Image (cartoon, rainbow, N blue to C red):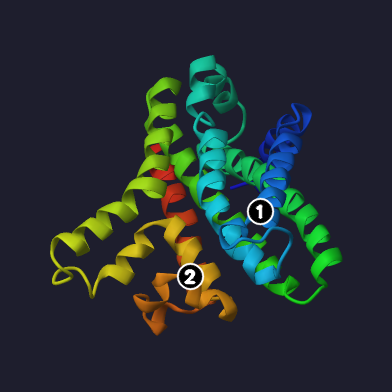
Amino acid sequence: MEFRQIATIAAKELRDRLRNRWVLAVALVFTAFALVIAYFGGAQQGAVGLRSIEFTITSLVSLVIYLIPLIALLLGFDAIVGERERGSLDLLLALPITRLELLLGKYLGLAAALTLSTVAGFGLVAGVLATQAGTAGMAAYAGFMGSSVLLGLAFLSLAVMLSVLAKDRTRASGLAIATWFFFVLVFDLLLLGLLVGTGGERGAQAFPYLLLLNPADVFRILNIFSLDDVRSLYGLTSIVPAALAKPWLMALVMLGWIAAPLGVATWRFRP
């Protein structure tokens, strides 16, 4: 495997996203939504305005869970199938480059664009928070930004896998939207329905570990358990055992969510 070939493909993908202002547009979306939520996040409690870093992170967690997976899936769903439909995939594979190098180059280029837009968008908000609330808690905010990047990379990995598996762009886009609905909206409802339907007699012990099957829940647990002041605000603190209340362990699980779909995509992309 030639890393120079991977870097060349990745650089082209990143340049394309920078040229069509995709990175700038997404960074502005993150900044705008984050500022609105940070300012009005306490409206339900009868207060508006920027509050503590911990409270701001708690408010932003919901935004990230809805927005970043959707953006990552829409960014990567046509990475391979799009090239195949345009007829450029055969041309790329005719060059002295392997399928694995092409796949990794595509993923790393898209990952760089997504990471850049996420860090730029939430980084601007960090500057505003630092001027209003001081630098205390900025380490926690940096952890929140890092976990947001990991969440985006996990769903981007899923998108690339779907792009390899799908026969055309239409099916790939449908699978991407279905994946977003399942992990963001349906998965937790199914688990709660199981618990409520059985009166808590079935699945209660396995419930915390079933949450690890959803990268969005891993992100939620990762941020909740990294902040002492906000643990009591979520019911998850009462059902997630102390064995899982470790940020480094949740980060490893998230890395697994990045590696596993890419492994499947690599396997299916073989000639």
- Residue 246: percent from left, percent from top: 49, 79
Q: Residue at x 51, y 47 (%)?
A: 66
Disc 1: which residue: 40
- Residue 249: percent from left, percent from top: 48, 75
- Residue 218: percent from left, percent from top: 45, 63
Q: Residue at x 57, y 44 (%)?
A: 104
Q: Residue at x 63, y 40 (%)?
A: 110
Give the side of residue 125 with respect to residue 90, left or right: right
Mark 2 nearby-residue class (10 Å; few <14, some 14–19, many ≥20): many
Q: In which quarter of the image is the C terminus?
A: top left
Give the side of residue 65 with respect to residue 42, left or right: left
Is residue 270 visible to the viewer in this orientation of the structure?
Answer: no
Mark 1 nearby-residue class (10 Å; few <14, some 14–19, many ≥20): some
Is residue 228 visible to the viewer in this orientation of the structure?
Answer: yes
Residue 59, by quadrant, is bottom right
> Which label is found at residue 24?
none
- Residue 14: percent from left, percent from top: 71, 37
Which of pointers 2 and 1 indicates the residue nearer the eye? Answer: 1
Disc 2: which residue: 250
**Secondary structure under the numbered disc 2 in the rendered image:** helix
Circle 1: residue type? Phe
Circle 2: residue type? Met
Question: How many marks overall?
Answer: 2
Question: In the image shown, does 171 or 259 lie closer to the viewer?
Answer: 171
**Secondary structure under the numbered disc 1 in the rendered image:** helix
Q: Which of marks 2 and 1 is nearer the N terminus?
A: 1
